[in-house]
Structures are given as structure tokens and as C-alpha cells.
Amino acid sequence: MDPTLGFILDLDGAEISSWVSRYLWPFTRIAGFFMVMPLFGTRLVTARVRLYLAIFTTVVITPVLPPMPVIEGIGLETMIIIGQQLLIGVALAFALEILMNIFIMSGQLVAMQTGLGMAMMVDPSNGVNVAVVAQWFLIFVNLLFITLNGHLVAIEVIADSFFTMPVGAGSLSGNTLFEIARLAQWMFSAAIVLALPAISAMLVVNIAFGVMARLAPQLNIFAVGFPVTMMLGLIILWITFSGYGDKFSGLLSQAFQFMRSYQI
């Protein structure tokens, strides 16, 4: 008789449940994380690729994780824990998704104020029409995210979450869910702060055009102002864009700090 076959036949249900639980619970949390995480959770990455990434990440980090609860069979308790792990993974990645939407919203605000909002294109990652300026900002921050090893830090954060939020200890607390909802406030305020230099500069330009129209009524201010506004908008973008890297780095640190503060 083959000794390998005999070893397989000697396994009992408890050992199989222990092995399955060891990898199942981390996999569900990591899979939920990759469903929403920037770059990996977009339409450009297929579900099969996200599944392979979740499996590979689970196999790599599971040996260093704390012991997982062993639950036999597929019952109500198992379904509840799977739902909890998916919720925690999605919530962890949601902070990073909000971070990317800060720059999309900032680009939309700048485009509308500078007259560049007419140039629209389909965002392939989300399937919606956005301004070209917003798409440019999104590509820029995605490249920065990879350059700053944000994807590696995100995987480190989700690995640490198994120590701060153990499997089977419960779901996210009410205070944590409230703080996640408050991320919308952070998104709007940060987007306005990023777009404020361009908005202020264009306000001054529009005031100047208003004075010109008052002093010279025969001047066709619409025919003159529109191309000048677009040209000045591009110049303002060129001047203010140099500081976006440092701003993204600071916002990324805030997002990771918020992710580490999650509690059950």
C-alpha cells in the first residue's frame, strides 16, 4: 500500500476542519479587501486575477497569523463569520478608495471652474464619464500609490488586522462604522482644499472679466473670456500640480493611520 495514501486515509474530520479554518478565514477577509482596493478592485482587473491575488496573499501571510477558530461543518455560525470577514476586508479597502476619489473630485472641481469640464471621457476603471483633468489626477495618484509601495503597506495593514481584529471576535464596532461614514466628510473637505488654489485664481480672473465688461460694454466678453479662461486654467494647473505629490503622501498616511485604528 502506498504510504502517502495511508497518511491521507488516517486524517480525521477535526484535522481537515483545522486546515480549512486556518486558510478560509484569512482568505475571506483578504478577498473582500481586493474587491475594493484601488487598482486591483477596478474593472480593468478581472475577478479571476483578484481571486489569484487573494489566494497567493493568503498562502504567504497565513503562517505568521495568530491561530484561527476551528468551526466544524457549514452552518449559521460559519456564514456569519464569513460575512464579518468580508465586511472587515471591504471596510479596510474603503478608506483607500475614498482617498482616490478625493483627487477625482478635486479634478472635477478644477475642470468645472477653468472651463475644461467639456472635455469628458469614460473612466475605464469605474465605467462613468469624468473630466479629463480628473482622469489625469487619478492616473497620477495611482502611479504614486505604486511608487510609494502603498500596495505593500496595504497588505501589511490587513495582515496586522488579524491581531487587532481577531477572527470570530465579532464585527466592526459602532464607533468604527460611524468613523467610516465620516470618511465622506474627509473626502469633500480634502477635495475642496486641493482645488481651492485653482478656484481662488479663477475667481480673481472672473472678477477681472466682470470689470472689463463693465468698463467696455462693446467688448464681447464671452468670446474673449472663454479661451483666456481655459489657457489660464492650464497655467494654474501647471503651477499647482507640483505640490500634489506631497499632498497625496500626507493623505495616504492619514488613510493608513485610519485603517490601523479599526476596532471590533
Image (cartoon, rainbow, N blue to C red):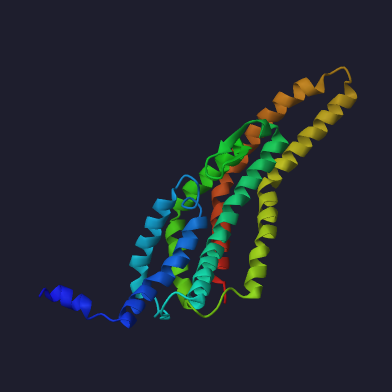
Residue at the (37%, 56%) spot, across then down: 52
Q: Position of residue 264 (x, y in %)?
A: 57, 77
Left or right: 57, with 40 as reference point: left
Image coordinates of residue 180 in percent, x first then y, are 63, 65
The residue most toward the top is 218
Q: Residue 11: which quarter of the image?
A: bottom left
Percent position (x, y) of residue 182? 68, 63
Quarter placement of the N terminus: bottom left
* Residue at position x 72%, y 37% in the image: 113
- Quick check: 5 left or right of 27? left
Is 26 situated left or right of 239 in this image?
A: left
Going 61% across and 50% down the picture, which residue do you hit? Answer: 101
Q: How many marks do you count on the picture? A: 0
Q: Which residue occupies the foreground of this view, 197 or 89? A: 89
Q: Which percent across, then down, holds residue 231?
A: 66, 28
Q: Is residue 250 visible?
A: no
Please state which of residues 47 and 120 is positioned toward the viewer in this rendering: 47
Residue 205, quarter of the rendered image: top right
Residue 108 visible somewhere in the drawing: yes
| For residue 254, above or below residue 76 | above
Q: Examine the rendered structure and indicate whether residue 44 appears above or below residue 69.
A: above
Residue at 40% from the left image edge and 70% from the top image edge: 24
